[in-house]
Image (spheres, rainbow, N blue to C red):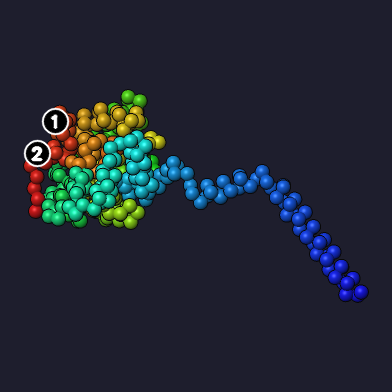
């Protein structure tokens, strides 16, 4: 009997504890229920910041490019191309060919252009305004442009950039002319040293693989930004994407930049020639006369410069 009573007491006690727990947990859940999705969202936001929010962090911007752009942003050109159904057929073709198990290694023109030449030519003088900088022609690691000058902060107050004096002088004219037309430009990237480009390319290559990274980012010594005459324009919500070409800023530059000596280095649909994807934000200063002549020829900048005298070591 004694045992039984004890057992009854125990059972009662446990039931009471269970009931209290149910009330506490149930009450808490009931009270918090509307908050839960909100809190989960907050956690997500924290873990995975909205990609659209671009930082103006110098380190983030410096990396890029084309020849040179920010890592996060550089992802965009691809997404963009896919969205707009740009001619991204090559990867598929390549896969098919691999699946068929063809022994012959077939390369697309893009892959050919992207492949660094084994016999690199070393550019004698980077200060030469028409120096040809490609995946086959390389600047020396120690090359630094003459007369680097600070880009005025009104073009990008976030951090200090540098450009060759002559290029900067014309960039200021270009910027003012755009402003008069109601178009406000921002400069996202200008001179980049060999070392900066080296780090940048390394970062991209670790994320995308070397070959893929080299479609939108130059290897060290092969970036026009090392010349101190190349500029990445921005100031839109489409910076460093193919959509920049359709913005007010992108269209103004395509129509007018050449009048101030700037040429778009990597136009649309010319990756098989230039080795780089469409970069409507990347312009290089080659002098007003040459830029006008280049515009008249309709050639890519690479082809135009190949027709100019070049010196290699
Ligand atoms: Zn660039």
Residue 250 in view: yes
Q: Position of residue 292 (x, y in %)?
A: 16, 30
Pick whichever, 220 or 163, lies toward us.
220
Q: Is residue 67 left or right of residue 76?
A: left
Name of the residue lying farthest toward the bottom: 2
Q: Residue at x 29, y 44 (%)?
A: 92
Q: Is residue 214 left or right of residue 302?
A: right
Circle 1 SS class: helix
Pick whichever, 53 or 47, lies toward us.
47
Q: Is residue 184 left or right of residue 256?
A: right
Quarter holding the N terminus is bottom right
Name of the residue lying farthest toward the right: 1
Q: Residue at x 35, y 54 (%)?
A: 207
Q: Position of residue 200 (x, y in %)?
A: 31, 53
Circle 2 SS class: loop
For marks 1 and 2 on the same chain, the one whose residue lies earlier in the sequence: 1
Q: Position of residue 254 (x, y in %)?
A: 26, 30
Q: Position of residue 57 (x, y in %)?
A: 40, 47
Q: Residues within 10 Å of mark 1 (few under 14, many from 20)?
A: few
Q: Residues within 10 Å of mark 2 (few under 14, many from 20)?
A: few
Pick whichever, 90 or 310, lies toward us.
90
**Among the 4 quarters of the image, the one containing residue 247:** top left
Spatial separation of the CA atoms under disc 1 and disc 2: 11 Å
**Among the 4 quarters of the image, the one containing residue 52:** top left
Residue at mark 2: 307
Residue at mark 1: 297
Please tell me the numbered disc located at residue 3: none
Task: From this view, report whether residue 96 is shown above or below residue 2.
Answer: above
Q: Residue at x 17, y 52 (%)?
A: 104
């Amino acid at each position: 009997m004694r045992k039984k009573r004890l057992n009854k007491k125990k059972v009662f006690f446990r039931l009471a504890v269970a009931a209290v727990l149910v009330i506490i947990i149930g009450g808490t859940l009931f009270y918090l229920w509307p908050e839960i999705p909100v809190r989960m969202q907050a956690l997500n936001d924290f873990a995975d910041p909205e990609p659209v929010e671009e930082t103006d962090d110098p380190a983030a911007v410096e990396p890029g490019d084309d020849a040179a752009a920010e890592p996060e942003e550089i992802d965009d050109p691809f997404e963009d191309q896919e969205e707009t159904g740009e001619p991204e057929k090559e990867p598929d073709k390549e896969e098919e060919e691999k699946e068929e198990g063809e022994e012959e290694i077939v390369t697309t023109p893009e892959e050919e252009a992207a492949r660094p030449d084994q016999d690199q030519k070393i550019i004698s003088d980077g200060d030469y305004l028409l120096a040809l900088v490609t995946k086959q022609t390389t600047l020396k690691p120690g090359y630094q442009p003459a007369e680097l000058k600070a880009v005025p902060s009104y073009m990008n107050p976030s951090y200090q950039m540098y450009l060759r004096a002559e290029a900067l002088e014309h960039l200021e004219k270009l910027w003012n002319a755009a402003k008069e037309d109601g178009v406000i430009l921002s400069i996202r990237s200008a001179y980049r040293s060999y070392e900066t480009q080296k780090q940048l390319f390394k970062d991209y290559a670790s994320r995308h693989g070397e070959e893929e990274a080299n479609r939108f980012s130059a290897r060290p010594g092969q970036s026009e930004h090392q010349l101190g005459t190349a500029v990445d324009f921005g100031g839109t919500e489409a910076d460093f994407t193919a959509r920049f070409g359709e913005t007010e800023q992108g269209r103004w530059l395509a129509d007018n930049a050449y009048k101030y000596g700037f040429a778009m280095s990597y136009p649309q649909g010319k990756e098989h020639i230039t080795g780089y994807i469409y970069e409507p934000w990347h312009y290089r200063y080659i002098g007003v006369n040459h830029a006008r002549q280049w515009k008249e020829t309709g050639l890519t900048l690479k082809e135009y410069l190949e027709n100019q005298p070049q010196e290699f070591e």
